[in-house]
Amino acid sequence: MSSERKIDPFAVIILVLSIIGIILVATQYFAGFYLGGGNYRYSCLDCGYATGVDLAAQVLILILLIVQIVIALNDLLPNRFIEKNLDQIGIILGGLTILFTIIGLGAFGIAYSEYEWWPETGFYGAIIAGILNFILFFLKYKNR
């Protein structure tokens, strides 16, 4: 008698998106502005022009994506380490990822509003991971 467990495709995609999001937030600029005279300044985890709020938002985004990885792994491993269905928590975490990404960019934009500023790769990685994970966790929850 075979008790094969099917691989959850939603969990696989959530896992991949979260890993990509973490890599982009941790290694790329989150936002930037033009200082003038050919000088550009950026916000990232180790950049000097991150504001306190956008830096905190980037750290929270990383934590949220790590927890989403844990939830995805819980659904993918043969022996679940948490028996409870965590899809609703995943929906909330995806929403919080979106919220903190927007808050972080808004804080950066307010702090440097006198300059021309824009979102960078780290922002896009976080917002896309948050939106898609939110949708995927919602679809997982609805399909159970």
Image (tube, rainbow, N blue to C red):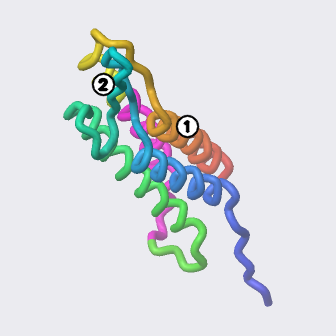
Vertically, is 50 above or below 2? Answer: above
Q: Nearer the viewer, residue 129 or 33?
A: 33
Q: Is residue 83 left or right of residue 46?
A: right
Residue linked to disc 2? 108
Q: Nearer the viewer, residue 123 or 3?
A: 123
Q: Is residue 54 left or right of residue 52?
A: right
Q: Position of residue 70 (x, y in %)?
A: 46, 63
Q: Position of residue 55 (x, y in %)?
A: 27, 38
User: Which residue sits at x=73%, y=70%?
Assistant: 6
Q: Position of residue 23 (x, y in %)?
A: 47, 52
Q: Around disc 2, counting alpha carbons within 10 Å, would you say few (fewer than 14), some (14 to 19), or many (20 or more)?
A: many
Three-letter amino acid code at the position of disc 1: Ile
Name the N-terminal-most of marks 2 and 1.
2
Q: Around disc 1, counting alpha carbons within 10 Å, would you say few (fewer than 14), some (14 to 19), or many (20 or more)?
A: some
Quarter assignment of residue 30: top left
User: Helix, strand, or loop for circle 1?
Assistant: helix
Q: Farthest residue in the front direction? A: 37
User: Helix, strand, or loop for circle 2?
Assistant: helix
Q: Which residues are magenta?
A: 82-102
Q: Nearer the viewer, residue 130 or 78?
A: 130
Residue linked to disc 1? 128
Give yes or no for residue 117 being in the magenta stretch. Answer: no
Q: CA distance from mark 2 to mark 1?
A: 19 Å
